[in-house]
Amino acid sequence: MDDNHQACLDVAYRYLSHRARSEREVRLYLRRRCFGENEVDEVIVGLKRRGLIDDSDFARLWTEHRQSFNPRGRAMLRLELRQKGVDADIVSQAIEDVDDSSCAYDAARRKVRHLSTSDRSQFQRKLFNFLRQRGFDYQVCQNTVGRLWQEVMGEKDNV
């Protein structure tokens, strides 16, 4: 193994140590670091063989992380994963179990804490826009906003 190959491998290991990455992300990063095509290809093959790069695992982890910490709609997840270079079939598999309604509700419930509930139209507009920016479709946004408005107003009436 020559010095250039080892240097490329070391850079790849450091890059992967922060979080899981797609093959495309690693490939682009190594190219930006001025490694030649041959070194990059050899390193990628070795990393895949060792299981350090696996787009299926990456897509699954990305989706799980988003659902847990920063919920997104299926459309937004699809876009994010495709931008990271994950194959469309792998993306479809990774997001097939995502429940947009549940994710929208989780995301919106967190946001509601920071919204003023004195003005219904402002509450609905802000929450609707918040959800749309996260890739939820119109109907899911409408249903979620209506549900949360009822919950918030019901809590106020019980106080």
Image (tube, rainbow, N blue to C red):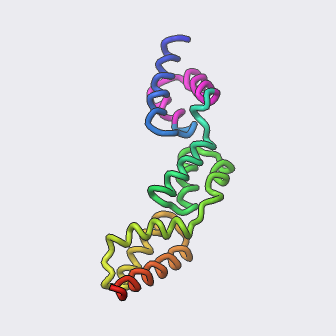
Total count of labels: 0
Please, which residue is most extreme toward the front here?
Answer: 159
Q: Residue at x 55, y 47 (%)?
A: 61
- Residue 45 forms part of the magenta stretch: yes
Could you tell me which quadrant the C terminus lies in? bottom left
Q: Which residues are magenta?
A: 26-49
Could you tell me which quadrant the N terminus lies in? top right
Tell me where residue 54 appears, x and y as whole percent.
61, 37
Q: Residue at x 53, y 49 (%)?
A: 62
* Front residue of this view, candidates 156 and 119: 156
Is 93 positioned to the left or the right of 68 in the image? right
Is 64 positioned to the left or the right of 118 in the image? right
The quarter holding residue 115 reads bottom left
The quarter holding residue 55 reads top right
Location of residue 3 with respect to 54 vertically, above or below: above
Q: Residue at x 41, y 85 (%)?
A: 154
Tell me where residue 133 appears, x and y as whole percent.
45, 65
Give the main secondary structure, helix, strand or loop, of the magenta stretch: helix
Please, which residue is most extreme toward the right here?
Answer: 89
Location of residue 86 with respect to 74 vertically, above or below: above
- Residue 10 forms part of the magenta stretch: no
